[in-house]
Image (cartoon, rainbow, N blue to C red):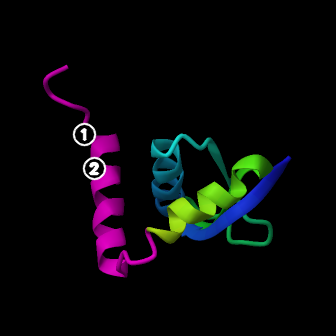
Amino acid sequence: MLKVVASVSSEPESELVSARLSEAGIQAIAQRSIGGPEWGYSGARDIYVEEADLSRAREVLKGDEGVSEDELADLSDAARSELKEPDAGG
């Protein structure tokens, strides 16, 4: 059974949270929150994990609480740039 481990304000932020959980070996699914705006990258998202992974996922994300809004914005911008600009070496 899936449980909400976090709620975030945008798609890029949900991708960052999902990637962080994936690095820890936890599969996560992001889905637009019910009742939120439906416009592109904006709009709240809920991050779901398996109930068995819930407490470990919370611990992983708790370790990220020290990240400032500016650092999160920089990470989000970097993630979008990587999606738009594939590696030139490939």
Q: Find the residue positioned furthest to the top.
A: 90
Q: Residue at x 15, y 28 (%)?
A: 88
Quadrant position of residue 6? bottom right
Asked whether 86 falls inside the magenta stretch, the response is yes
User: Would you say 21 lies left or right of 53 here?
Assistant: left
Number of on-image labels: 2
Crowdedness near tag 2: few (<14), some (14–19) or many (≥20) residues, C-alpha within 10 Å: few
Q: Amino acid at mark 2?
A: Ser
User: Would you say 28 lies left or right of 2 here?
Assistant: left
Q: Which residue is mark 1?
A: 85
Q: Residue at x 54, y 58 (%)?
A: 14
Residue 69 position within the rendered picture, expressed as x and y whole percent measured from the top left: 37, 79
Q: Residue at x 72, y 72 (%)?
A: 36
| In-front residue for pair 87/55 | 55
Q: Find the residue positioned furthest to the left.
A: 89
Vertical placement of residue 85 versus 60, above or below = above
Q: Which residues are magenta?
A: 64-90
Q: Which secondary structure, mark 2?
A: helix
Q: Amino acid at mark 1?
A: Glu
* CB atoms of marks 1 and 2 within 8 Å: yes
Picture disc at residue 81: 2
Q: Residue at x 73, y 65 (%)?
A: 33
Residue 11 position within the rendered picture, expressed as x and y whole percent measured from the top left: 53, 58
- Position of the C terminus, as image quadrant, is top left
Picture disc at residue 72: none
Residue 29 position within the rendered picture, expressed as x and y whole percent measured from the top left: 66, 47
Crowdedness near tag 1: few (<14), some (14–19) or many (≥20) residues, C-alpha within 10 Å: few
| In-front residue for pair 70/49 | 49
Quadrant position of residue 68? bottom left
Q: Find the residue positioned furthest to the right.
A: 1
